[in-house]
Amino acid sequence: MKIQSLPKEPLSIINIILLTLKAYPKVVPRIWMFVALSSVGHLVIPWLYQINPAFAAVALFGFVLLTWFLYPIIMWLVEAEFEGGAHMPHSVAYQMARERYLSILGSNLVFFAIGLFVALVIYGLDLVFHLIGHHPFFFAISIALSLYIFIMLYFAIPCIVIEKNVVIGAFFRSIALVKNNWWRTFVPLALIGLAILGFEALGILFTGKARMFLFTGYNFILQMLFYPLIVTVTLVMLNDLVLRHQKRG
Protein backbone atom coordinates (compact mmCIF):
# COMPACT_ATOMS: atom_id res chain seq x y z
CA MET A 1 0.00 0.00 0.00
CA LYS A 2 1.48 3.33 -1.08
CA ILE A 3 1.27 6.38 1.13
CA GLN A 4 -0.65 9.46 0.06
CA SER A 5 1.34 11.75 -2.20
CA LEU A 6 2.23 15.21 -1.00
CA PRO A 7 -0.94 17.34 -1.08
CA LYS A 8 -1.60 19.91 -3.79
CA GLU A 9 -3.52 22.15 -1.38
CA PRO A 10 -2.51 23.50 2.06
CA LEU A 11 -3.40 21.39 5.09
CA SER A 12 -4.52 22.18 8.60
CA ILE A 13 -2.08 21.48 11.42
CA ILE A 14 -4.10 18.41 12.41
CA ASN A 15 -3.99 17.03 8.87
CA ILE A 16 -0.25 17.66 8.67
CA ILE A 17 0.19 15.56 11.81
CA LEU A 18 -2.19 12.86 10.55
CA LEU A 19 -0.46 12.62 7.17
CA THR A 20 2.91 12.37 8.92
CA LEU A 21 1.70 9.55 11.15
CA LYS A 22 0.14 7.75 8.18
CA ALA A 23 3.34 7.99 6.14
CA TYR A 24 5.68 7.05 8.98
CA PRO A 25 5.32 3.22 8.87
CA LYS A 26 5.74 3.27 5.06
CA VAL A 27 8.81 5.51 5.18
CA VAL A 28 10.80 3.62 7.83
CA PRO A 29 11.53 0.50 5.71
CA ARG A 30 12.97 2.72 2.95
CA ILE A 31 15.44 4.63 5.10
CA TRP A 32 16.18 2.48 8.17
CA MET A 33 19.69 1.56 6.99
CA PHE A 34 20.73 5.20 6.52
CA VAL A 35 19.08 6.18 9.79
CA ALA A 36 21.05 3.43 11.54
CA LEU A 37 24.29 4.80 10.06
CA SER A 38 23.29 8.28 11.27
CA SER A 39 22.54 6.91 14.73
CA VAL A 40 25.53 4.65 15.31
CA GLY A 41 27.45 7.47 16.99
CA HIS A 42 25.12 7.17 19.98
CA LEU A 43 26.46 3.65 20.49
CA VAL A 44 30.14 4.20 19.75
CA ILE A 45 31.24 7.70 20.80
CA PRO A 46 30.38 7.51 24.55
CA TRP A 47 32.47 4.34 24.81
CA LEU A 48 35.34 5.96 22.92
CA TYR A 49 35.17 8.89 25.34
CA GLN A 50 35.65 6.50 28.22
CA ILE A 51 38.81 5.19 26.55
CA ASN A 52 40.28 8.38 25.03
CA PRO A 53 38.45 11.75 25.04
CA ALA A 54 40.66 13.18 22.28
CA PHE A 55 40.00 10.23 19.98
CA ALA A 56 36.29 10.47 20.79
CA ALA A 57 36.31 14.14 19.76
CA VAL A 58 37.85 13.24 16.40
CA ALA A 59 35.32 10.44 15.95
CA LEU A 60 32.49 12.82 16.83
CA PHE A 61 33.67 15.29 14.17
CA GLY A 62 33.79 12.54 11.55
CA PHE A 63 30.39 11.25 12.64
CA VAL A 64 28.83 14.72 12.26
CA LEU A 65 30.27 15.02 8.74
CA LEU A 66 28.79 11.62 7.91
CA THR A 67 25.34 12.54 9.18
CA TRP A 68 25.36 15.70 7.04
CA PHE A 69 26.10 13.52 4.01
CA LEU A 70 23.36 11.02 4.86
CA TYR A 71 20.68 13.62 5.57
CA PRO A 72 19.94 14.54 1.92
CA ILE A 73 19.88 10.85 0.95
CA ILE A 74 17.29 10.18 3.64
CA MET A 75 15.27 13.22 2.61
CA TRP A 76 15.24 12.25 -1.08
CA LEU A 77 14.22 8.67 -0.31
CA VAL A 78 11.30 9.92 1.79
CA GLU A 79 10.26 12.31 -0.98
CA ALA A 80 10.43 9.45 -3.51
CA GLU A 81 8.10 7.41 -1.28
CA PHE A 82 5.59 10.26 -1.30
CA GLU A 83 5.84 10.54 -5.07
CA GLY A 84 4.30 7.15 -5.70
CA GLY A 85 6.79 4.89 -4.01
CA ALA A 86 9.35 5.12 -6.80
CA HIS A 87 12.63 3.50 -5.84
CA MET A 88 15.51 5.90 -6.19
CA PRO A 89 18.73 3.96 -6.91
CA HIS A 90 21.22 4.44 -4.11
CA SER A 91 23.91 5.33 -6.63
CA VAL A 92 21.81 8.29 -7.80
CA ALA A 93 21.20 9.39 -4.21
CA TYR A 94 24.94 9.20 -3.45
CA GLN A 95 25.79 11.28 -6.52
CA MET A 96 23.19 13.93 -5.64
CA ALA A 97 24.46 14.00 -2.04
CA ARG A 98 28.02 14.59 -3.25
CA GLU A 99 26.83 17.44 -5.46
CA ARG A 100 24.97 19.15 -2.61
CA TYR A 101 27.36 18.26 0.23
CA LEU A 102 29.37 21.50 0.30
CA SER A 103 26.17 23.55 0.31
CA ILE A 104 24.75 21.47 3.15
CA LEU A 105 28.02 21.73 5.04
CA GLY A 106 28.08 25.51 4.54
CA SER A 107 24.46 25.91 5.62
CA ASN A 108 25.10 23.96 8.82
CA LEU A 109 28.10 26.16 9.59
CA VAL A 110 26.02 29.29 8.98
CA PHE A 111 23.22 27.87 11.15
CA PHE A 112 25.58 27.17 14.04
CA ALA A 113 27.30 30.55 13.59
CA ILE A 114 23.95 32.30 13.93
CA GLY A 115 23.18 30.27 17.05
CA LEU A 116 26.58 31.08 18.51
CA PHE A 117 26.13 34.79 17.75
CA VAL A 118 22.73 34.86 19.48
CA ALA A 119 24.17 33.00 22.49
CA LEU A 120 27.10 35.43 22.73
CA VAL A 121 24.79 38.44 22.55
CA ILE A 122 22.60 37.04 25.33
CA TYR A 123 25.64 36.12 27.42
CA GLY A 124 27.20 39.56 26.85
CA LEU A 125 24.05 41.40 27.91
CA ASP A 126 23.80 39.27 31.02
CA LEU A 127 27.48 39.75 31.80
CA VAL A 128 27.25 43.54 31.57
CA PHE A 129 23.79 44.16 33.04
CA HIS A 130 23.27 40.99 35.17
CA LEU A 131 19.88 40.61 33.56
CA ILE A 132 19.17 37.02 34.56
CA GLY A 133 20.04 37.63 38.22
CA HIS A 134 18.07 40.88 38.51
CA HIS A 135 15.36 40.19 35.94
CA PRO A 136 14.56 36.45 35.73
CA PHE A 137 12.10 37.04 32.87
CA PHE A 138 15.12 37.91 30.69
CA PHE A 139 15.99 34.20 30.69
CA ALA A 140 12.53 33.36 29.35
CA ILE A 141 12.84 36.11 26.73
CA SER A 142 16.23 34.80 25.59
CA ILE A 143 14.83 31.27 25.25
CA ALA A 144 11.83 32.56 23.30
CA LEU A 145 14.07 34.61 20.99
CA SER A 146 16.36 31.64 20.33
CA LEU A 147 13.36 29.44 19.60
CA TYR A 148 11.86 32.04 17.27
CA ILE A 149 15.08 32.29 15.26
CA PHE A 150 15.45 28.50 15.11
CA ILE A 151 11.93 28.08 13.71
CA MET A 152 12.41 30.87 11.17
CA LEU A 153 15.58 29.25 9.84
CA TYR A 154 14.52 25.62 10.23
CA PHE A 155 13.83 24.98 6.55
CA ALA A 156 17.10 26.40 5.22
CA ILE A 157 18.81 23.01 4.97
CA PRO A 158 15.71 21.18 3.65
CA CYS A 159 15.39 23.90 0.99
CA ILE A 160 18.97 23.20 -0.12
CA VAL A 161 18.17 19.50 -0.38
CA ILE A 162 14.75 19.67 -2.02
CA GLU A 163 14.84 22.95 -3.93
CA LYS A 164 18.61 23.12 -4.54
CA ASN A 165 18.88 26.66 -3.17
CA VAL A 166 22.27 28.25 -2.60
CA VAL A 167 23.37 28.59 1.03
CA ILE A 168 22.42 32.21 1.80
CA GLY A 169 19.39 32.03 -0.46
CA ALA A 170 18.13 29.01 1.48
CA PHE A 171 18.05 31.01 4.72
CA PHE A 172 16.08 33.81 3.10
CA ARG A 173 13.80 31.19 1.53
CA SER A 174 13.13 29.65 4.95
CA ILE A 175 12.33 33.06 6.42
CA ALA A 176 9.95 33.84 3.53
CA LEU A 177 8.12 30.53 3.99
CA VAL A 178 7.79 30.68 7.77
CA LYS A 179 7.27 34.39 8.51
CA ASN A 180 3.47 34.27 8.10
CA ASN A 181 3.17 30.69 9.34
CA TRP A 182 5.34 30.66 12.45
CA TRP A 183 2.82 29.03 14.74
CA ARG A 184 1.86 26.48 12.08
CA THR A 185 5.52 25.50 11.93
CA PHE A 186 6.09 25.62 15.66
CA VAL A 187 3.24 23.33 16.75
CA PRO A 188 4.22 20.10 14.88
CA LEU A 189 7.91 20.59 15.70
CA ALA A 190 7.11 21.32 19.34
CA LEU A 191 5.00 18.16 19.65
CA ILE A 192 7.84 16.02 18.32
CA GLY A 193 10.37 17.89 20.45
CA LEU A 194 8.32 17.32 23.59
CA ALA A 195 7.94 13.63 22.74
CA ILE A 196 11.71 13.29 22.33
CA LEU A 197 12.40 15.13 25.58
CA GLY A 198 9.84 12.95 27.36
CA PHE A 199 11.45 9.72 26.18
CA GLU A 200 14.92 11.10 26.98
CA ALA A 201 13.72 11.82 30.52
CA LEU A 202 12.36 8.29 30.81
CA GLY A 203 15.69 6.94 29.60
CA ILE A 204 17.57 8.85 32.30
CA LEU A 205 15.03 7.76 34.90
CA PHE A 206 15.07 4.05 34.11
CA THR A 207 18.62 3.51 32.83
CA GLY A 208 20.67 6.20 34.51
CA LYS A 209 23.70 7.85 32.95
CA ALA A 210 26.05 5.57 34.89
CA ARG A 211 24.74 2.49 33.09
CA MET A 212 26.43 3.34 29.83
CA PHE A 213 25.36 0.30 27.83
CA LEU A 214 21.65 0.75 28.53
CA PHE A 215 21.73 4.52 28.09
CA THR A 216 23.62 4.51 24.77
CA GLY A 217 21.46 1.71 23.39
CA TYR A 218 18.32 3.54 24.46
CA ASN A 219 19.41 6.72 22.67
CA PHE A 220 20.20 4.71 19.55
CA ILE A 221 16.67 3.30 19.59
CA LEU A 222 15.20 6.78 20.08
CA GLN A 223 17.15 8.05 17.09
CA MET A 224 15.92 5.15 14.98
CA LEU A 225 12.33 5.88 15.99
CA PHE A 226 12.25 9.67 15.78
CA TYR A 227 14.61 10.51 12.92
CA PRO A 228 12.20 9.16 10.24
CA LEU A 229 9.37 11.01 11.95
CA ILE A 230 11.28 14.32 11.93
CA VAL A 231 12.24 13.97 8.26
CA THR A 232 8.69 13.04 7.27
CA VAL A 233 7.03 15.93 9.09
CA THR A 234 9.67 18.31 7.73
CA LEU A 235 8.91 17.28 4.16
CA VAL A 236 5.14 17.52 4.71
CA MET A 237 5.45 20.97 6.32
CA LEU A 238 7.82 22.24 3.64
CA ASN A 239 5.37 21.22 0.93
CA ASP A 240 2.54 22.92 2.84
CA LEU A 241 4.49 26.15 3.35
CA VAL A 242 5.48 26.29 -0.32
CA LEU A 243 1.82 25.93 -1.33
CA ARG A 244 0.78 28.70 1.06
CA HIS A 245 3.61 30.93 -0.19
CA GLN A 246 2.51 30.38 -3.79
CA LYS A 247 -1.08 31.23 -2.92
CA ARG A 248 0.00 34.53 -1.38
CA GLY A 249 1.81 35.15 -4.64
Image: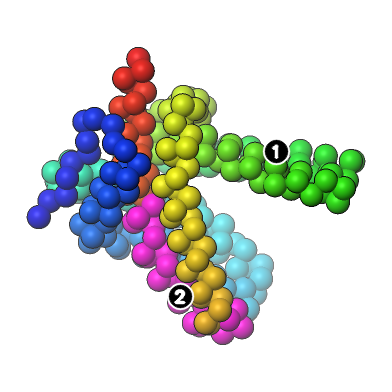
Q: Of 12 and 158, which appears nearest the observer?
A: 12
**Is residue 223 part of the magenta span, yes or no?**
yes
Q: Residue at horizontal 16%, vertical 49%?
A: 3
Q: Of 99 and 146, which appears nearest the observer?
A: 146
Q: Residues within 10 Å of mark 1 (few under 14, many from 20)?
A: few
Identify the magenta region.
208-230
**Is residue 176 part of the magenta span, yes or no?**
no
Q: Residue at horizontal 46%, vertical 26%?
A: 180
Q: Mark 2: which secondary structure?
A: helix
Residue 52 place in picture, x, y as percent? 65, 74
Residue 235 vertical placement versus 225 (above, below): above
Residue 35 place in picture, x, y as percent? 36, 60
The residue that label 2 is drawn on is: 218
What number is the disc on residue 117? 1
CA separation in Å, label 2 and label 1: 33 Å
Q: Quadrant of the C terminus?
A: top left
Location of residue 119 by image quarter: top right
Location of residue 79 by image quarter: top left
Judged left or right of residue 173, residue 139 is right
Q: Residue at horizontal 44%, vertical 31%?
A: 181
Judged left or right of residue 75, residue 25 is left
Secondary structure that dominates the magenta span: helix
